[in-house]
Amino acid sequence: MNPQDILTAFNAAYTKDPRDGLTITHDTEDGKLRIQVRHVSVEGDVHGFDVVAQPTEAEGKSAEQVGRDVAEVVARELAYAQLPAQDENGDFRRIVV
């Protein structure tokens, strides 16, 4: 599955959150799409999470469906409004879709 097709579907499905200090970026690693969500608080603390699109062939999902699923996960996690901080290794929580 082409990560660019998943990203296109994500961008079409995701409704931007107007929160100040919020950034959403992406990259690909080993043919997988990773959406990085970060929020810098007024105190300068960085919180966030990563969503990795890693569908299996057995799921039978299209790139469009995976992109919508990733958008739904990002929106749901942001709705909680309490984003996790980095762990002791400096990593953010990783959610696989």
Image: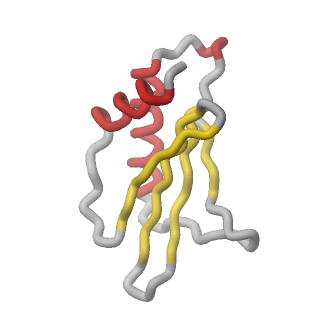
Residue 14 falls in which quadrant of the image? top left
The x and y percentages for residue 92 are 62, 61
The quadrant the N terminus occupies is top right
Estimate the x, y position of residue 76 in percent, counting from the top left.
43, 48
Image height check: is 66 above or below 44? Answer: above
Quarter where residue 52 is shown: top right
For the image shown, how many numbered marks are present on the structure?
0
Q: How far across and how far down the image is residue 40, in percent?
A: 43, 75
User: Could you tell me which residue is drawn at 51 percent across and 74 percent down?
Assistant: 46
Coloring basis for residues: secondary structure
Q: Residue at x 35, y 30 (%)?
A: 8
> Quadrant of the image for the C terminus?
top right
Task: In this rendered view, identify the residue nearer to me: 97 or 35.
Answer: 35
Is 71 on the left-hand or right-hand side of 32? Answer: left
54 sits left or right of 12 in the view: right
Quarter assignment of residue 96: top right
Residue appearing at x 54%, y 45% in the figure: 51
Q: Residue furthest right?
A: 89
Q: Position of residue 93 (x, y in %)?
A: 63, 57
Give the residue at x 61% y 15%.
59
Check the image and report above or below for 2 versus 93: above
Q: Residue furthest bottom?
A: 43
